[in-house]
Amino acid sequence: MSLSTALIAQAEQSSQDTSKKQIQLLHADKLSYDQSISRAQKLNGSVQFKYKETLMFCDSAFMFRDSNIIKALSNVRIKNDEGVSITGDSLVYFGKKKKARITGNVLLKEKDKTLKAPFVEYNFDTKMAYYAAGGTLYDRSENSTLESEIGYYYTQSKQFFFKDSVFYKHPDYVIHSDTMMHQTATDISYFKGPTHIQYKAKTNIYCQYGWFNQQNEDCKLIGDAVIEKNGQEIKADSIVYNDKNAQGEAFYNVQIDDTTEKIMIQSHFARFNTNDSTYLATDSALMIEYSQEDSLFLHADTLYSFSDSTEGKTLFAYHGVRFYKKDLQGICDSLVMKSKDSLMYLYTNPVLWSDSNQMTADTILLWYSTGKIDSMRFLENAFILETLDSVKYNQISGRYMQGFFTKDNKLKNMRIQQRAKTIYYPKNKEDYIGINQASSTEMNIRFKKQEINQIIFYNPESSSLSPLSPLDFKKLPGFQDRSKYRPISRSSVFLNISIEPESQLNTEQKQKG
């Protein structure tokens, strides 16, 4: 039997709170006083309360007039105007705080989403649900599951906030995070704390905080950001990335590691594509080729690399190229490196140093692979300079040169073609015996311990041996000692040194040639 109007009025009066807004008793089959529970009113049978637009149902309840607390038992259910329902075994409503604590097989449901937790606290004013003893959120529309120790759901703004041991499993990705907030309307998830994302089983992502958009697959990663995909690892202070088109940008302390090619790029800005391993790096850009123990360190204003099916991987380095390797150093304005034929092209005032030898030409081709130098070609105005002391230089010049190296990257021999000339200081044991000046159509220079050991002339044109003179400073046309530009360490590749214009003598010689 339903309560009479008088009994309902009495129940409403007992449930009043000091605030202006009250919870209303809408229905109960029976109301009585429980003598065993001090100052408690007992409600039984289809009990129903209302607060604003939120309804609360249960089989039975106790109302405590003094503390303005309601204890609801059996088949507890809360339903708000946002389409959210919460069910559980029991509930305690705290009238002063406008909060309810639901315990025992708690389920929060909204459309395709279901939250399961040991207990849930619900705020009737803010319409926020909270749990702190572990919870699992199921989304049938996405076939996804999210677990966390602590969770908040703001039913009006459709925002979920999860903290501690967050684990999100979606058909396309898996997320492990310390703290995560998900905006249902936009499908954007925000992270704070160490976060790992495995996307479509082929992209691994890490950051300290950032966000991820499920709809367009955009993400922004901040703090020790890392992306791993297709044998590439990209690290930076922050990364903006779209996995749908595999393109992104990295900012500050950037490191791109191509584990397949054994090449690492460092810079403070980079654009990259994880599908084809294309990247453009600038701002303190550095390439490290680490296939062997003696790594190659190469710096330029800009580094650009791409791959295709016919040429393989190609690296462009342009403006202010400087590189260092223990047994080889070099500078030029621009450089191209092709992995398919292991060929490196050096353009515009290129210079190479190997031990005491300086090698120059208009263009230099270097066959270099996995840390080993096979051979070199010097095209137009080739010149080798070996420094003996402040006034003595062994010199070799010609139109073309080709050099060959030993297995341990030591210069073995050099072949000079067309307009071959030399100034050479022969030795008798430890003493120089004179100055040898010669020219021929071709020459073959053999090195021993990185010093000129033998010169073979083909079709000699002239040759003379003159005695040494303290004042003699013999130079071939095109002579230039560029040792001051030589990188002497891995850090020295960043020195901003421009090659001075060539001397008028060298320019005139080029014009004659």
Image (spheres, rainbow, N blue to C red):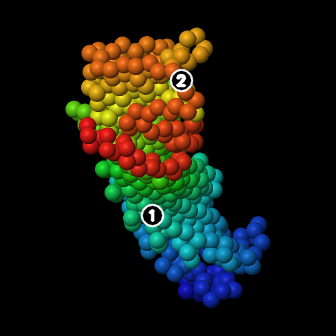
**313 over 12 or under it: above or below:** above
Horizontal side of 332 relative to 153 (left or right) equals left
Q: Is residue 106 visible?
A: no
Q: Is residue 253 visible?
A: yes
Q: Specify which label sits upstream in the sequence, 1 or 2.
A: 1
Q: Could you tell me if the residues under marks 1 and 2 are in contact, i.e. CB atoms within 8 Å?
A: no
Residue at position x 59%, y 16% in the image? 431
Kindly identify the amino acid type of the residue bearing the numbered disc 2.
Answer: Leu
Q: Secondary structure at mark 1?
A: strand
Query: Which of these two is toward me, 272 or 168?
Result: 272
Give the residue at mark 2.
468
> Residue 410, image x and y in percent?
47, 19
Give the residue at mark 1.
183
Residue with the most extreme left position:
310
**381 over 197 or under it: above or below:** above
> Residue 52, image x and y in percent?
52, 81
